[in-house]
Image (cartoon, helix red, strand yellow):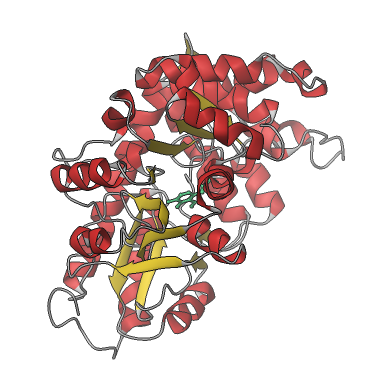
Amino acid sequence: MPPFTPSPLSRRQWLKSSGLVAGGALASGALAPAPLLAADASITSVVDGQTTAAGFAAHERMIAALRRAEGPIRLASNENPYGMAPSARQAIENGWKQHAWYSAPAVPNLRKIYAQSVGVPEDHIMITAGSGELLSIAVLAFGLNGEIVSAWPTYEGLPRYAESMGLRVHKVPLDAGFAHDLEAMDRRLVQAVDLVFVCNPNNPTGTLTDTARLTQFVSNAARRAMVLVDEAYHDFVTDPGYASCIDLVKKGENVIISRTASKIHGLAGLRTGFVIARPDIIARLQPASPSFPGVFGALGAAASIQDTAYQAMCKQRNVEGREIMRAALAKLGRTMTDTQTNFVFFNAGLPVEQIQKALLAKGFQIGRAFPPYTTWARISIGTPDEMRAVAAALPEVLAGTPRSMGSGD
Ligand SMILES: Cc1ncc(COP(=O)(O)O)c(C=O)c1O
């Protein structure tokens, strides 16, 4: 594989690398197709709805060139660098006519396919416009008359929305190992608390909270309040000790599981999220929803869920990228969390804004600061080549900054 350079390719260079200038099409001015459509040879590399290894390799080459041509490499928002599966794209192209309909079959079809994939009846699933929609409507449906408990820092969608509605949020600091401090959260489960938010693995730290202890906490809290467990990064976890809290839904407890098509399925721009909960809980969430999900997201997600080969390839590449960063940061003597997600979180030893600026100058866009960890940087995992390039840039960016003193510094 050629060495990675984040500098933008010119349009002509890119077209050349994708073979589109052959035959003088560019010179004659006859080059009509948009780059995304023209370059995607991988679209034909799907067998029975599963992306083939050769198809993924072609897809990866196309994506890598596109990402370089787009400008700074996007490593800020925990997106899937590979985007949607070729099979998902094919499904969108095949079902495109549904875009004009209000009650398109794509959405109920996705409900059915998702229910089968997670092993619950169809009436336990609601499709939302990204999982972000659930994080708001859960507050409207279950939180408006009381208080909310959440870890901190965590994914801010639910707590920030609640605060914007004037609600009190008990923000409980993470423990020294960056897990949810379950004893402290338990102490905050006062009478007024109606809604509890848990994010596992947690964003921005990437960490898991011990499965047995978390399950016990959630089950206990669910006797007094509604508990929402955000599992946006579920599909990237490799720790064999991890288990989803979905079994608590299957047991009929007051638990809502949140998942998304934005991460492993690479559909962040198509806004598709999955709610897993008892039907009576869904019946309370549904009227709080301001709209309904889009057809293209539903078509793409349904194909992607069935394309287990594509998911496995994305997960494997993510592990490679994570390991490249883990090794580079260890070599630089930096403390990082035990991430189980598609991003790393480490102590850079200087304000994150400075790291952001220095890495942007080298062609990489990274995450913002997450107080109180103002010297900790969050970098999303891109392709392995991109991670090798970031790792190569880090010694200069971090030069002269204090190395880590040990865990929890
Ligand atoms: C933990 C977590 N939950 C939810 C979301 C929202 O994702 P979406 O609305 O795209 O499903 C994100 C986005 O990064 C996230 O990190």
Q: Residue furthest bottom?
A: 400
Q: Quadrant of residue 163?
A: bottom right
Q: Which residue is at the front of the view, 133 or 16?
A: 133
Going by the image, does 210 lie left or right of 126?
A: left
Going by the image, does 103 lie left or right of 329?
A: right
Above-or-below relation of 374 to 28 = below
Residue at the (51%, 66%) spot, across then down: 365
Residue at the (18%, 61%) spot, across then down: 183
Above-or-below relation of 240 to 368 = above
Above-or-below relation of 356 to 282 = below
The image shows a total of numbered marks equal to 0
**At which x and y percent is residue 147?**
45, 60
Q: Which residue lies furthest to the right in this view?
A: 29
Query: Is residue 100 in view?
Result: yes
Residue at the (48%, 33%) spot, across then down: 275
**At which x and y percent is residue 325?**
28, 60
Q: In which quarter of the image is residue 16?
A: top right
**At which x and y percent is residue 137?**
58, 45
Q: Which residue is at the front of the view, 354 or 188?
A: 188
**At which x and y percent is residue 399?**
30, 86
Q: Which residue lies furthest to the front in this view?
A: 191
Query: Is residue 42 in view?
Result: no
Quarter of the image for the C terminus: give it.
bottom left
Q: Which residue is at the front of the view, 139 or 82?
A: 139
Q: Which residue is at the front of the view, 51 or 296?
A: 296
